[in-house]
Image (cartoon, rainbow, N blue to C red):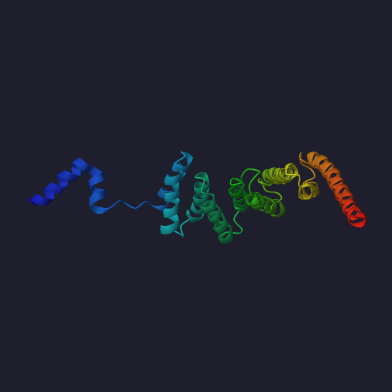
Amino acid sequence: MIPWFLAVIFILLLFNGCALWKSLFGEEELTPAELMSQGVEDFNDGKFEAATESFQKIKDRYPYSEFAIKAELKMADALYERDLFDEAYDEYTEFEKLHPRNPEIPYVVFQKGMCNFSRVSTIDRDQTYTWKAKEDFERLIKRYRRSAYTERARKKVRECYIKLAEHELYVGNFYFKMEKYQPAMSRYLYLIENYPDVGQYYEALEKIKICREKLAEEKKEEGMSWWGRLKSSVFN
């Protein structure tokens, strides 16, 4: 005869199924293959937070499985899609350090550039991320010339140059409006020396011409003022 408490458990399991089993004995642990499948499915469905959790579990529980390397890369991709660019950049960097000869490294370097490029601010703000993105893309171009990502990196480098030129022009124009022609001209000169092939080049040249005229006028006025003071001191 079956003891009464076993009969009760049997009936509860019959009606409540897996949910009760999980609450009593814990959730069944998924295999690396199942976690990867679940993570990729969530990623493709745009459920990037859930995908991150699946890939993290593979990294933590199965670091030596055949899915570990792919999980590391997909983890970085999921963080990038969540706009967590600092975290994504760190994950891509770690992947590059751990697997320097992996065939996905050109993609990883490109994504590192995109993590910085995605944080580029407006032209009136500091352009540190623009510089960092440019460096990542240029490193990709230099080291992986035959990569499928090289041409995309070249386009991004040009976009970086345009943003940097726009920033220099913006600052130069700011000084120009304040009638501070010397610092304005320095900015314009820097622009044409370092970014000669972008659209801001001709505007900078025109402003340089005006700055030189204004500075010449200021110098002339200073000379006249000095001569006036000298005459006043001599004849008075």
Where does the image place residue 227, in percent across and percent down from the top left?
Answer: 90, 52
In front of the other: 191 or 52: 191
Q: Is residue 74 left or right of residue 202?
A: left
Residue 17 placed where, x, y %?
A: 23, 43
> How many numbered callouts?
0
Q: Residue 225: x, y in percent?
A: 86, 50
Q: Residue at x 12, y 48 (%)?
A: 7
Q: Which residue is pictured at 61% across the width and 58% down the height?
A: 101
Write the residue at 51% across / 55% down: 69
Above or below: residue 69 compared with residue 178: below
Quadrant in which residue 57 is drawn: bottom left
Q: Residue furthest front?
A: 236
Q: Residue at x 19, y 40 (%)?
A: 15
Residue toward you, 50 or 128: 128
Give x and y (percent) for residue 200: 76, 40
- Give the quarter of the image for residue 196: top right
| 185 sits to left or right of 16 | right
Q: Residue furthest left?
A: 1
Residue toward you, 185 or 97: 185
The one nearer the camera, 69 or 157, is 157
Q: Quadrant of the C terminus?
A: bottom right
